[in-house]
Amino acid sequence: MESRLTRLEAVQTMLLEIGQKSSTCTDISEFLQAVHAALGRIMYAANFFVALSDHEGPVNQVRFVYYVDEVDAPPSGDELFELKRGESPTAAVITSGKPLVMTAAEHVSKRADNADFGIGTIAEHWMGCPLLDQNHQVLGAIVIQSYDKQHTFSQEDQALFALIANHVSSALRGLQSMDRLERAVQERTALLAHEVAERRRAEAIQRALYELANLSATTTGGNELNTRLHEIISELVPARNFLIAIYHPDTGDISVPYFVDEKDDQAPVKRFDFGIGMSSYILRRKQAALLDKAGLDALVAGGDVARPLGNVDIASWMGAPMLLGDQAYGVIVVQSYDAAVLYTQADLDILAFMASHVAVAIARLQAEREIRRAKDALEEQNAALESALASLKAAQGELVRQEKLASLGRLVAGVAHEINTPLGICVTATSHLVEELKLTREDLAAGALDEDGLNQFLDIVDQSLRIMTTNTQRAAALVRSFKQVAVDQSSDDIRSFNLRKYLDEVLLSLQPKLKGKPIAVDIDCEERIEMASFPGAVSQIVTNMVMNSLVHGFEDGQSGKIKISGKLDGDFVVFEYSDDGAGMDTSTLAQLFDPFFTTKRGSGGSGLGAHILFNLVTGALGGTIKVASAPGMGLHYKLRFPKVKRR
């Protein structure tokens, strides 16, 4: 009982929906789609179609205006089909005007008698009802069918379907009413006409704005801009009488740079004080105004407009301020002397809209003039600054060159001093050997040379030669390392070298600087790092790091440690240098790479060591450099540069 009541409520809801759709839809397919959806909520409706008679042609022609089927493809909605009585179930319903329910067995039996009976796939259960007009003439047929034996239509389904067909018939009568269709067409036509008019108006305004923007971008102002502005606004509203007034806040007056009028050849005044005329009225209110002759006379009589300028025998008048934010640049005025040309609020809105964009154009032109003046001044200043900068760069380059040469000179002096020791030892050993040789020869000539004396002489020769060999090798190593480092520092050529071996050579050349200082240097560099880069840059970088540590990191006599490491990271070398010296605070660290910055000016610091170091890492080696330090924590560099440098 409850299920039946629920279904009846669903049927009632469906009938209400059909009624509502029939009053809102003008498209038959849309209406029938809604009917199909609602029908599916109360019974099985997977296969559903509607065929309507073609009243403009023969009565026996129909068109399938809606067709949904699980098996058969839908026919074209515009194609006409000729139906003969008894030819198909649909034709039987339309020609008889009576409902028809048919099972698959009945359909097969009919087709056995008539092979042409029906053109579609035979359904397990087929149900169709006629659609009738108010005179009970057949409009068409509404059909529902099932190809599934589990879904057949009961007597209750057939009764409900007949009821629904009756409501669909009523709805179709309304939908097919010519009056209703004509009204819909008329309403749609009127709506489209309004939309077209609005679109054309919007396109005209858009085109005018584009032309105005292009005009402000391509002209420098003057009469060309004003004339073209008049033409642009004339394309939107009738503007045979047109005036542009510009407000000058610095002098407190108004000028008229452009004036076109049917009755006056030129403006009554070219410049006047603010407060006079209609332009002052618009500027004071900062609002657009639309007036006729009576409205203008009322403003003059009421004292709102003082001393109107020009011809006041108007039929219609519009004025709009050129506003950008709260700043007023002037007024645009359009007026008509012809009673047939009366402006509307829509015209005033267009004029006000255009005036606001003209204000933007004027502001842009003024800003461009200011920018040009500022640019000229800046160009003069830039020329002077560039000249000063070129001189400064030349001086800085010379100082850097001198610093490099001074560094090389200090290296030469240190190596020369260091070579003196082994060479002096060699000279002393040679002199001693010569003297012993002389004494031995004298003993030999006198016949006093015995076996012990000869052995003693040979021991002296052996000892002297060992001393001379050791010291000459030491001197040769110093000269060799100095030669390679000196050549690299003065050369800009790329060559291949082993990083670890080269670091040993550089540190050997720095031994004169490290000698006598309690500073230990620890090298932890991978043996396999083969580079193709600028060795001179590497030498200069390491030299500057070590010298900076000796000058700035450690006090005289202070012990410390310097650690240098190198390792591969793909195609890059990660090079790290650290000391455990004094370190530096944040402000000093921030200026470390600035040229000429030093904390030991006058005490051996030039202020260019770290600057040259930074330029060599980022320039010659093509890498990056990071530095970290804190007071008492020493200084730590981390460099990363390509193993193979490409020019």
Image (cartoon, rainbow, N blue to C red):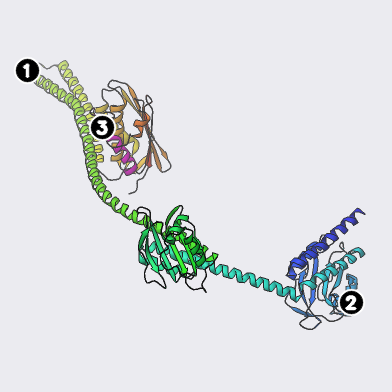
Q: Name the residue carrying label 1.
A: 446
Q: Give left or right: position of 282 versus 441.
A: right
Q: Of circles 1 and 3, which is in front?
A: 3
Q: Position of residue 403 (x, y in %)?
A: 23, 36
Q: Of circles 2 and 1, which is in front?
A: 2
Q: Name the residue carrying label 3.
A: 509
Q: Nearer the viewer, residue 577 or 336?
A: 336
Q: Amino acid at mark 1?
A: Ala
Q: Of circles 2 and 3, which is in front?
A: 2
Quadrant of residue 567 in the image?
Answer: top left
Q: Name the residue carrying label 2.
A: 110
Quadrant of residue 69 in the image?
Answer: bottom right
Q: Position of residue 251 (x, y in %)?
A: 34, 54
Question: In 3D space, how far apart are the residues under numbered discs 2 and 1 (Cα atoms)?
Answer: 160 Å
Q: Which residues are magenta?
A: 603-622
Residue 617 on the magenta segment: yes
Q: Nearer the viewer, residue 47 or 270?
A: 270
Please tell me which of labels 2 and 1 falls first in the chain.
2
Relative to 537, say whether 633 is above or below.
above
- Name the element at disc 3: helix
Please report the residue visible at 90 percent of the width from the left and 57 percent of the height from the top.
4
Question: In 3D space, how far apart are the residues under numbered discs 2 and 3 (Cα atoms)?
Answer: 117 Å
Q: Residue lying furthest bottom in this view? A: 58
Relative to 359, say whether 646 is above or below.
above
